[in-house]
Image (cartoon, rainbow, N blue to C red):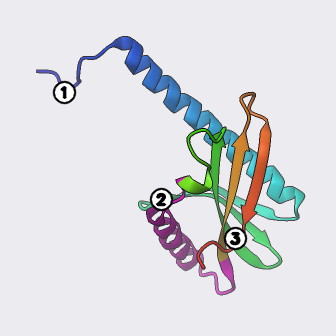
Amino acid sequence: MSIFKEGNPEIIQRDLSNKTKNLKTGRLGEEIAKKYLQANKYAIIGQNYRTRRAEIDLIALYKGILIFVEVRTKKGEMFGSPEESFNRSKKNKLINNARAYVAKKRWKRKYRIDAICIVLDNNYRVRRINHYENITF
């Protein structure tokens, strides 16, 4: 007996296509957020920092503060906003991941976690971008 489920190839292809589109949207959002931060005098020092717990999309320095940035990107808002996709579990993972990074790097100064929420139109152009600072409080 196969460990793979048999299914309709069209459905499987559509599921893979949606995952590819979501990955494309997410990576595009990270690049948009990176350019946005750089335009606002943030120095990007890391991207896609992974641990066992989670991933930090962007790590930046701004006025001597280490900033961990979670990027949430959606194409349209028909099925909810990017802000709504950010839940308590994701927030807790980010906090723990930031603490692990700070400990590993022996960072002794201030740090915070920000979120950048981006909505794209159907042509993948930015409809809106919101930067939320210090989302842990």
Q: Dot 1 corresponds to which residue? A: 3
The amino acid type, in three-letter code, at marker 2 is: Ala
Expressed as whole percent of the image width and height from the top left, the position of residue 1 reads 10, 21
Expressed as whole percent of the image width and height from the top left, the position of residue 79 reads 56, 41
Q: At numbered mark 2, what does the secondary structure look like: helix, strand or loop?
A: loop
Q: Which mark is residue 23?
A: none
Residue found at the very far top of the displayed protein: 9
**Mark 1 nearby-residue class (10 Å; few <14, some 14–19, many ≥20):** few
Please tell me which residue lies in front, 57 or 132: 132
Identity of the residue drawn at 53% across and 79% down: 103
Q: Which residues are magenta?
A: 85-111
Identity of the residue drawn at 72% across and 39% down: 120
Query: How far apart are the two marked residues, 3 and 1, measured between alpha carbons?
Result: 43 Å
Q: Which mark is residue 67?
A: 3
Q: At numbered mark 1, what does the secondary structure look like: helix, strand or loop?
A: loop
Residue found at the very far bottom of the displayed protein: 108
Looking at the image, is mark 3 or mark 1 earlier in the sequence? 1
Does 63 appear above or below 51?
A: below
Q: At numbered mark 3, what does the secondary structure look like: helix, strand or loop?
A: strand
Q: Dot 2 corresponds to which residue? A: 54
Expressed as whole percent of the image width and height from the top left, the position of residue 133 reads 71, 71
Judged left or right of residue 95, residue 64 is: right
Query: How far apart are the two marked residues, 1 and 2, measured between alpha carbons?
Result: 28 Å
